[in-house]
Amino acid sequence: MDKFIKKIVWLFILAPAVYLAIVWNTLPETIAMHFNLKGDIDRYGSKNELVTMILILTVVNAIVYLLLPQVYRIDPKRYAAENKDRLFRIAFAIVVFTSAVLCLIIYSSIHGNIKFSMRFILAGVGLMLAVVGNYIYNIKPNYFAGIRLPWTLNNDENWKKTHLLGGKLLFGGGLLIAVICLFTPFTFSMIALFTILLFVIITTCIYSYRLYKKLNVHN
C-alpha cells in the first residue's frame, strides 16, 4: 500500500499547478482571491497573484510530505523509528486535503460568481482528523506527533492507553464532523466542529491525567 501511495503522491501534490496551467486561458484578469468564513468573496486580485499563491502552497505541501515522515530521525525516543510508516500516511492525508482545497480555490476563481462552500472544507477537515485518529491510536512514543503530555512522554503505558482512547475518539469525532458539516448550515457546522474537537481533547487529557495519578499511587 505504501509503495502505491509513494507512486501517486506527487500526482496529488502537483495537481493544483497542473489544473491551474490547464485553465489559465479561461481565468479572468481579476479573480476572487479570498473568501470569508461564510464563503462570500471579500477580496479580488490578479491571476498572477493566484499563480504565486498556488505555487508557494504547492511547495509547502511538498515540504510537509518530505519532512514529516523523516522527523523520527531526530527523535530521542527509542521507538520513534517505528512511527515512520504512520507519519508517512498522515503526511499523505495532509497532502490530499491541501491539494483538494487548492483545486477548489482555482475552481472558485474561474467561476467568480459562485459562493465558496465552506461546508466542504469543514467536512474535509473532519475526514482528515478521522485519518489522523486512525493512525495515532497505536503510534509509538515520540516528541513530534501524538498526544505529547508530560505524563504520556514519561510513561509508555500511559502513552499507549491515552492514544488508544484518543485515536478512537478522534476517528469517530472526525467522521461525525464530516457528516454534520455536509448536511447542516455553516454556523451550526462550526459550532459542532469546535464542540466535538474540545470534547475529544478534554476527554483524552482528563483520562490521561487520571491514569497518571493512578499509576503513581500504585508505584
Image (cartoon, rainbow, N blue to C red):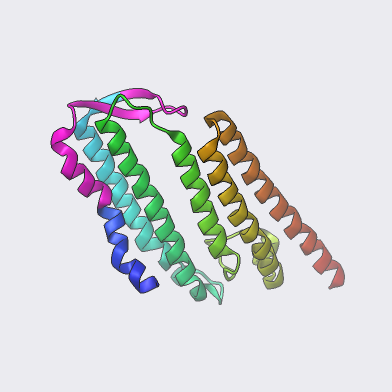
Is residue 196 rendered to the left or right of residue 90?
A: right
Outermost residue to the left: 25
Q: Residue at x 28, y 26 (%)?
A: 112
- The image quadrant that residue 65 belongs to is bottom left
Percent position of residue 132, x then y: 52, 58
Q: Residue at x 47, y 29 (%)?
A: 37
Q: Is residue 59 above or below residue 155?
A: above
Is residue 122 rendered to the left or right of residue 1?
A: right
Outermost residue to the right: 217
Q: Is residue 30 above or below residue 213?
A: above
Quarter of the picture holding the N terminus = bottom left
Q: Residue at x 32, y 37 (%)?
A: 105
Quarter of the picture holding the C terminus = bottom right
- The image quadrant that residue 180 belongs to is top right
- Which one is nearer the viewer's eye here, 75 or 194? 194
Span colored in magenta: 15-43
Q: Magenta segment: does it hold 126? A: no
Percent position of residue 188, x then y: 59, 32
Q: Magenta segment: does it hold 27? A: yes
Mark yes or no: residue 154 visible: no
Percent position of residue 16, x then y: 27, 47
Counting the numbered discs, the total is 0
Q: Is residue 26 above or below residue 170?
A: above
- Which one is nearer the viewer's eye here, 137 or 56? 137
Percent position of residue 101, x then y: 37, 43
Mark yes or no: residue 177 visible: yes
Q: Residue at x 50, y 71 (%)?
A: 83
- Which one is nearer the viewer's eye here, 80 or 1? 1
Outermost residue to the front: 183
